[in-house]
Image (spheres, rainbow, N blue to C red):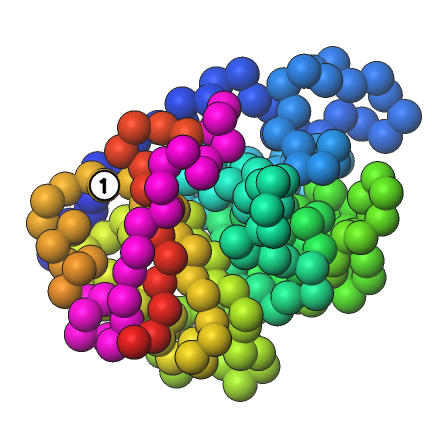
């Protein structure tokens, strides 16, 4: 039986390059790097056999994990931009516990760690080893140690945990201050499990920030129903709060909490 999938729109930031240059080599694309606090983030590199491009993903959930999607860039830049608001940031991240759902290449979670958070990355089990390599070998980050950032104040990446939204939560996951998700709604049958997972991870103080790109009316309706049924409430972040460069028509950022 075929699996119904939502339409996947491709990236719209084609000038960005996420491939790490060899050590000691001059960077051939310095102007095309995606960076948070002047630290570039990489998702591929030359020397490791576990580089994502060498993988043979077999499921839809796994295949989507090996791409960089617009929402991950928009959410990452939003997290950084809101820390520069003239008043205090809406979502302070320093020393906050963060879980990223459906981390894929880990861009949002790595960004949060650069901004000072204590981050746990999660995705399906088949993605875990590759994601660990992205953190350690692609970005030179040691689990549990402070992420090196100009001026200090970096956070940590605590680990990478396999998480299937249709199964019980691992006991190792902490109750987070923030849950982050970017372009994590791909197939209709995972919409309800996603919001069940969010509700199960949350306490009354947990805030979920989700970057969402609408791809079908049917999915939009299913999302609203799942949010309500899981006892959650959603508010949409005003578009003028986004980073002025990293935004896109049709992409929203939601704040989700328990009722």
Residue 194 left/right relative to 47: left
Q: In which quarter of the image is the C terminus?
A: bottom left
Circle 1: is it few (<14), some (14-19), or many (20+) Cα within 10 Å?
Answer: some
User: Which quarter of the picture shows residue 46?
Assistant: top right
State the residue position of label 1. 214
**Residue 52 in view here:** no
* Residue 100: in magenta span: no
Locate residue 67, reporting x and y percent: 46, 38
Residue at horizontal 76 percent and vertical 26 percent from the top: 21
The relative height of residue 10 versus residue 192 in the rendered view (above or below) is: above
Q: Tell me where the magenta segment starts and ends, as one range.
A: 226-246
Residue at horizontal 38 percent and vertical 79 percent from the top: 200
Residue at horizontal 73 percent and vertical 60 percent from the top: 156
Find the residue positioned furthest to the front: 87
Residue 63 left/right relative to 106: left
Locate residue 61, reporting x and y percent: 36, 53
Q: Quadrant of the N terminus?
A: bottom left
Q: In the image shown, does 91 or 148 lie closer to the viewer? A: 91
Q: In the image shown, does 199 or 26 lie closer to the viewer? A: 199
Residue 58 left/right relative to 161: left
Residue 183 left/right relative to 113: left
* Residue 228: in magenta span: yes
The relative height of residue 157 versus residue 22 in the rendered view (above or below) is: below
Locate residue 34, reporting x and y percent: 62, 29
């Amino acid at each position: 039986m075929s699996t119904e999938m939502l339409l996947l729109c491709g990236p719209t930031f084609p000038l960005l390059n996420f491939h790490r240059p060899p050590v000691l080599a001059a960077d051939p694309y310095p102007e095309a790097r995606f960076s948070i606090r002047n630290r570039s983030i990489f998702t591929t590199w030359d020397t490791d056999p576990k580089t994502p491009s060498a993988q043979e993903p077999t499921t839809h959930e796994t295949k989507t994990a090996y791409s960089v999607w617009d929402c991950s860039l928009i959410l990452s830049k939003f997290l950084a931009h809101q820390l520069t608001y003239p008043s205090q940031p809406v979502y302070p991240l320093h020393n906050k516990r963060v879980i990223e759902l459906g981390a894929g290449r880990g861009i949002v979670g790595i960004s949060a760690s650069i901004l000072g958070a204590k981050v746990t990355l999660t995705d399906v089990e088949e993605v875990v080893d590759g994601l660990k390599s992205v953190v350690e070998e692609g970005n030179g980050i040691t689990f549990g140690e402070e992420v090196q950032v100009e001026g200090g104040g970096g956070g940590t990446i605590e680990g990478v945990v396999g998480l299937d939204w249709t199964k019980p939560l691992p006991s190792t996951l902490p109750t987070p201050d923030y849950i982050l998700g970017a372009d994590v709604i791909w197939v209709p049958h995972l919409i309800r499990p996603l919001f069940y997972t969010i509700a199960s991870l949350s306490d009354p103080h947990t805030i979920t920030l989700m970057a969402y790109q609408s791809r079908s009316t049917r999915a939009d309706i299913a999302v609203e129903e799942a949010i309500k049924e899981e006892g959650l409430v959603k508010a949409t972040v005003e578009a003028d709060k986004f980073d002025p460069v990293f935004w896109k028509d049709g992409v929203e950022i939601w704040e989700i909490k328990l009722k």
